[in-house]
Image: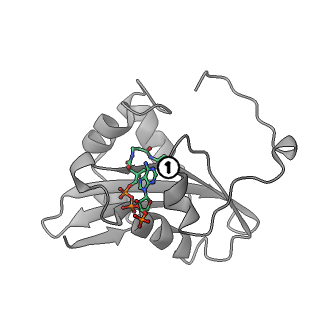
Amino acid sequence: MQFAVDTAFSRLDFQTIHKWLSNTYWARGMSQARIQKGFKASTVVAGAYLRSGRLIGVARCVSDTTRFGYIADVFVEPTMRGRGVAHKLVKRMMEEPKVRDVEHWYLLTKDAHRVYEKLGFKVFDKPERFMRLSRKNS
Ligand SMILES: CC(C)(COP(=O)(O)OP(=O)(O)OC[C@H]1O[C@@H](n2cnc3c(N)ncnc32)[C@H](O)[C@@H]1OP(=O)(O)O)[C@@H](O)C(=O)NCCC(=O)NCCS
């Protein structure tokens, strides 16, 4: 299967992205407008496209472009999984000039650790240093 990763916001198909993300455990029920707002405010967005132009995967990151970056909303269309799409999406996104020099990358995942381990991520070794304040139960 041939696909290419592109970081242009204008190419993203938000009807499809909304259909995908609003059924995930972390963004269940979110409106298309809020999902699109989050992508628009992100530092780098990435889409994986078949040669036909069809979107088959997406990812985004938020970063200060120097010390830290946070990866979110990594999703690959169910029929296209297991072919390296997520790996290439995240790798390509982290290589984008704007965020290439970021010192520390962070993300949360319930069960996709392997995807990120292959890119060098490790489980946080000092969880007691990690804090969060949530306004939503997810
Ligand atoms: C998780 C997800 C993005 C992976 O996409 P993908 O394109 O199938 O992943 P890749 O093909 O790039 O996989 C890269 C590696 O991770 C492994 N992997 C992929 N998904 C995995 C999962 N859910 N659990 C454990 N390992 C996984 C693959 O086997 C592969 O390792 P290998 O080369 O040793 O076989 C995709 O299954 C998905 O969209 N899931 C639903 C949304 C989700 O959970 N997103 C992640 C949020 S952090």
Quarter location, residue 67: bottom right
Q: Is mark 1 within 8 Å of ligand 1?
A: yes
> Considering depth in this image, is 12 or 88 the residue closer to the camera?
88
Residue extending furthest toward the right: 129
Which residue corresponds to the image point at 50% horizontal and 33% vertical from the top-left?
Answer: 26
Quarter location, residue 121: bottom right
The reply, left or right, for residue 84 in relation to residue 113 is: left
Quadrant location, the N terminus: bottom left
Quadrant location, the C terminus: top right
Which residue corresponds to the image point at 49% horizontal and 71% vertical from the top-left?
Answer: 91
Indicate whether 107 appears above or below 102: above
Indicate whether 75 appears above or below 105: above
Residue 28 percent location from the top left of the image = 43, 27
Classed neighbour count for the residue bearing mark 1: other residues with Cα under 10 Å, few (<14), some (14–19), many (≥20): few
Which residue corresponds to the image point at 25% horizontal and 64% vertical from the top-left?
Answer: 49
The residue carrying mark 1 is: 112
Which residue corresponds to the image point at 35% horizontal and 69% vertical from the top-left?
Answer: 6
Residue extending furthest toward the left: 52
Could you say whether the residue bearing mark 1 is in a helix, strand or loop?
loop
Residue 29 percent location from the top left of the image = 40, 23
Residue 98 percent location from the top left of the image = 59, 73
Indicate whether 130 appears above or below 58: above
Indicate whether 13 appears above or below 90: above
Report the amino acid beneath label 1.
Answer: Ala
